[in-house]
Amino acid sequence: MTTTAVTHIASLVTNDPSLGNGTPLGLIQDAAVVIDGDRIVWTGESSKAPATDNVLDAAGRAVIPGFVDSHSHLVFAGDRTQEFNARMSGQPYRAGGIRTTVAATRAASDEELSANVARYLAEALRQGTTTFETKSGYGLTVEDEARALRIASRHTDEVTYLGAHIVSPDYADDPAGYVDLVTGPMLEACAPHARWIDVFCEQGAFDGDQARAILTAGRSKGLHPRIHANQLTYGPGVQLAVELDAASADHCTHLTDADVDALGQGNTVATLLPGAEFSTRATWPDARRLLDAGATVALSTDCNPGSSFTSSVPFCIALAVRDMGMTPDEAIWSATAGGAAALRRTDIGRITPGARADLVLLDAPSHVHLAYRPGVPLVSAVWRSGQRVA
Ligand SMILES: [Zn+2]
């Protein structure tokens, strides 16, 4: 294997609290990282770095772990510019706009869908995302959902079956029949291509009983649950997520004190998706309240053509710091280690020996600049599995 050292890193985020300054970010000043093949093999002070085959001088810039974007919807076709434009002209967001994308996605070829996924992935990679989860949910037939998952699984291991995104328009008069389809033949066809099962538990989508039936059925086929919960209104989603040991409850915008307590005490990560609130002019989720209750918080893009058409984790970090009560340190942690926790992964989201060599070099002396300089393209190099990819 070829070894490479990145040296003279002004500030290195390791996400190992036993390193560096002892905070959750485990910050090391004037640091170096050594990569061997696809793994990190050493981190520490630059002056103590071991000899390697190659050396890259970071020249006083910051290095952070690659972002782990644990929530996106990238298998789609079509465009919803007009809907966004109308919303920004005063119309409220409702779950039903998904139908527009369903029609376009069904009509698209496999090649078009795959090219779309690849395009948004490349866009995310340039902005520092080295791991992403993505979902089905714009097919809503047995064949179209299985197709979306097959396509997604060519691009990532973190694939989620979301046949329960909305009730298919084909079942508008028979939502119970659609739940039977999602938990029966559709699940049968989709389970081999997915790791996770998700449901949009919301007024206008699926209620708590339907969501429980769907997630329980998925679990019996070896899929682990995650939930779109409490985005537009208060509801049973968060409690259900904790009850079923879901890896993540996503959105968490409208929470009761009992919801916050449940997330503070359970193993379920609260994944906040501020791109959605930004793009729908909705109330921000209160990250501070969750963090103060002891919840593990992840930050993710929710990249999708309807309610959050951004692939930029740095943008979400800036929103979380400006509008959701997070410190810059907390936001960086949530977008890296927090995303890894939401995917129940320990091999990513940190820069410590044994971790996958996913690194982002910033054109800045500190990770704080991601919030301090919003909208500025600070990502200057990206390594994934030890390969320089952007
Ligand atoms: Zn979503």
Image (tube, rainbow, N blue to C red):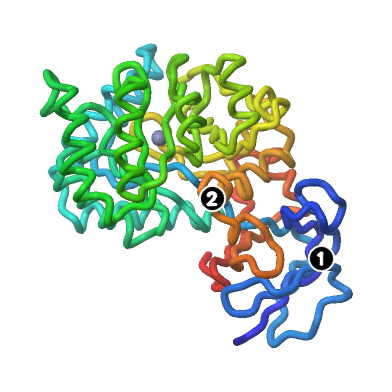
Instruction: Identify the residue under disc 2.
Output: 344
Q: Residue at x 26, y 22 (%)?
A: 96
Q: Which of pointers 2 and 1 indicates the residue nearer the eye? A: 2
- Secondary structure of the residue carrying numbered label 2: loop
Q: Is residue 127 left or right of residue 355?
A: left
Q: Earlier in the sequence, mark 2 or mark 1?
A: 1
Q: Is residue 45 left or right of residue 4?
A: right
- Neighbourhood count class around disc 1 (C-alpha, 10 Å): few under 14, some 14–19, many 20 upward: many
Ligand 1's quadrant: top left
* Placement of 255 over or under 273, stated as above or below: above
Q: Residue at x 75, y 73 (%)?
A: 42
- Secondary structure of the residue carrying numbered label 1: strand
Q: Amino acid at mark 1?
A: Ala
Instruction: Identify the residue under disc 1.
Output: 31
Cα separation between marks 2 and 1? 28 Å
Where does residue 249 sit, x and y in percent of width and height?
49, 33
Q: Is residue 106 left or right of residue 29?
A: left
* Placement of 219 over or under 41, stated as above or below: above
Is the residue under label 1 in contact with that under label 2 (CB below 8 Å)?
no
Where does residue 230 sit, x and y in percent of width and height?
46, 22
The one of 7 and 302 positioned closer to us in this rendering: 302
Q: Amino acid at mark 2?
A: Arg
